[in-house]
Amino acid sequence: MSPIVDFARETPGVESPAFTTVPELSAGFDLLYEQRFAEAREAFAGWESRNPEEPFGEVAVAASYLFEELSRQGVLTSDFFLNEKKFLRGIDGSPDPGRMSHFRDALARVRELAGERQKTNPNDGEALLALTLAAGMESDAESILQKRHLAGLKQMKKANGYAKKLLAQHPEATDAYIAPGIANYIIGSQSAGSRFVLRFDGIHGDKKLGMEQVARTAENGRYLRPFAKIILALAARREKQNGLAQRLFRELSQQYPDSELFASEYAKAMSVASGD
């Protein structure tokens, strides 16, 4: 057991979201996956007010704005993932400027708080998880919403670096696996010529490895488990692994029965033959 985990578990009042599941944060993420974005942010803000030095509160706030915009743009759907042009180039049109401004403000605060923790310990697990997820979210926003693909790749590179450092020390920080997983899957989906140009710092593009890494979060993640299931299910649809997609969307629709998104995607997945 790592000293950070021991400290978090043995010290009254200390909540360590990287290494223990915090019920209040889990409830907030459940609201997020139910597309109740304002209520999710209220829950995150409440936790953050009692844990002002923890960067994960702002990670959650940033995630709420990003997830809301991805939902509004229809990104987390098979219609988007199965459209090769959209999947590789991004949305039609532009994201909501106000929502993106709030998203970037939250990311700036994440990095500020993580930086403060790293002054004491450069390998602080909470800081590394926060930086991993912040860079991963910014990569998604730049590539998919803003269509600034070079900027997105730079953030993807940062997310992968933070994740490797964190997971080398703390493999139990399972939410972090989603960052290199998405990176490997997206780059692995590019053409051979594009992958050659994009070979940088350990991310060479491997769809199979990417799906396996996302599956680590889908199986054991603390807060991002449902999000990882969404990504893995949609990747499975792209790879014609329809049985896997059906199972994951069935689980999501059962966990969140009021979600129109999961019910719709489950119905679409069930309309095609299993191909595993």
Image (spheres, rainbow, N blue to C red):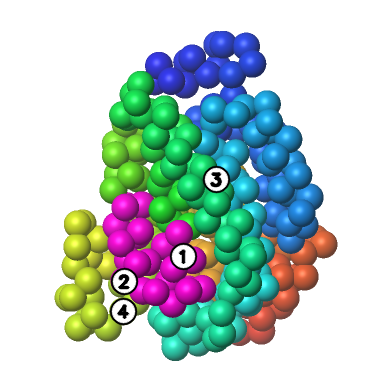
Quadrant in which residue 172 is drawn:
top left
Q: CA distance from mark 1 to mark 4?
A: 16 Å
Q: Are marks 4 and 2 in contact (CB under 8 Å)?
A: no
Q: CA distance from mark 2 to mark 3?
A: 23 Å
Q: CA distance from mark 1 to mark 3?
A: 14 Å
Give the main secondary structure of the magenta stretch: helix
The local crowd at label 2, few if under 14, some if 14 to 19, many if 20 or more residues have their Cα within 10 Å, is: few
Reading the image, the residue beneath label 4 is 190
Residue drawn 27% across and 67% down?
A: 205
Residue drawn 28% across and 48% down?
A: 161
Q: Is residue 164 above or below residue 186?
A: above
Q: Are marks 1 and 3 in contact (CB under 8 Å)?
A: no
Q: Amino acid at mark 3?
A: Val
Reading the image, the residue beneath label 1 is 140
Q: On the picture, is 205 further left or further right than 95?
A: left
Q: Nearer the viewer, residue 42 or 74?
A: 42
